[in-house]
Amino acid sequence: MELNQQKELFSKAYVRAVAAVAGFSVSQPEVDDDSIDLKIVARGGEGVVFSPELNLQLKCTSRDVLDGQFIRYPVRIKNYRDLIINSQVPRLLVVVLVP
């Protein structure tokens, strides 16, 4: 298995583990043509939003991406545009830093 494939699988497993501890469900779109790797859903809930969702684009790196208080991670223009698009479901970039 290539290193990039290993990092992809690790980042998905890490996010799934964190979501499970928080009590959220995680699903993966069958096709990734929208730069969405995983979807987190909180079932039920009360208030304004019922069953809120969050779309995630995952990146995994061993590079030093910490710059003081900020994380600097370059993404392709297509991925950036997919992240900032006006969407009903919010989108986040999750960068998993590994040794």
Image (cartoon, helix red, strand yellow):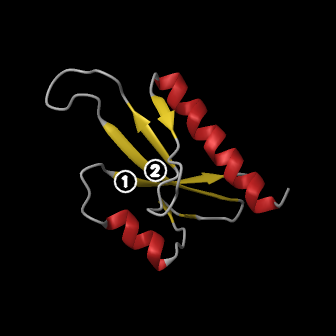
Q: Amino acid at mark 1?
A: Arg
Who's the residue at 61% across and 51% down the image? 96
Residue farthest to the right, as pictured: 1
Q: Is residue 15 left or right of residue 7?
A: left
| Residue neighbourhood size for the residue with mark 1, other residues' Cα within 10 Å, grouped as few (<14), some (14–19), many (≥20) | many
Q: What is the count of numbered marks?
A: 2
Q: Is residue 56 left or right of residue 7?
A: left
Who's the residue at 45% across and 75% down the image? 78
Image quarter of residue 42: top left
Residue that badge 2 annotates: 56
Residue 85 can be seen in this image: yes
| Residue neighbourhood size for the residue with mark 2, other residues' Cα within 10 Å, grouped as few (<14), some (14–19), many (≥20) | many
Image quarter of residue 13: top right
Question: Residue 43 location, x and y as percent?
Answer: 34, 24
Residue farthest to the bottom, as pictured: 77
Tag on residue 91? Answer: 1
Residue 99 can be seen in this image: no
Question: Residue 41 location, x and y as percent?
Answer: 39, 33
